[in-house]
Amino acid sequence: SATELSPGKCLDLRLGAARQAYLLAVEGAVTLASEKTTASLTTHDAAELKGPLSLELSAGAAGAHLLIFEMAATGDGRADAVAAEPRA
């Protein structure tokens, strides 16, 4: 899905245990925050997300245009990826 966040606006993103997502910051800046970690993306940055996961996406001062691709979890992905929250 595509979404546009106005400056300072937030969006909750939840992924179930058998789900994963790729998030692309097309324009602007966004902060991804969970109970355990925080990361920031700016224009053309991307993140690989693995469930179960609950994030708050907060747009920066200029807002953000985001593409979010959610799908069933697969066994492949980046070898250097770090989980934002431990998986059970």
Image: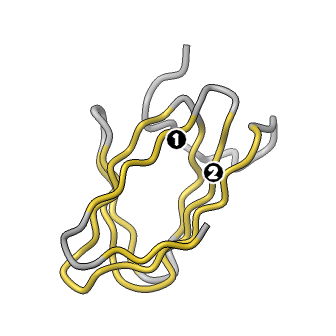
- Find numbered disc 2 in the image and state the secondary structure of the residue it sits on: strand
Mark whose residue sits in front, 2 or 1: 2
With 71 as the anchor, is 37 left or right in this view? left
With 34 as the anchor, is 87 left or right in this view? right
Mark number displayed over residue 15: none
Amino acid at circle 2: Ala
Q: Where residue 53 sits in the image (x, y, percent)?
A: 48, 34
Lower position in the chain sequence, tag 2 or tag 1 = 2
User: Relative to 38, is 63 above or below?
Assistant: below
User: Can you identify the residue that label 1 sits on?
Assistant: 82
Callout 2 crowding tier (Cα within 10 Å): few <14, some 14–19, many ≥20: some
x 36%, y 83%: residue = 28
x 80%, y 38%: residue = 74
Where residue 24 sits, quadrant-wise, is bottom right
Amino acid at circle 1: Val
In the picture, the quarter occupied by the C terminus is top right
Mark number displayed over residue 21: 2
Q: Where residue 56 sits in the image (x, y, percent)?
A: 32, 49
x 43%, y 86%: residue = 27
- Find numbered disc 1 in the image and state the secondary structure of the residue it sits on: loop
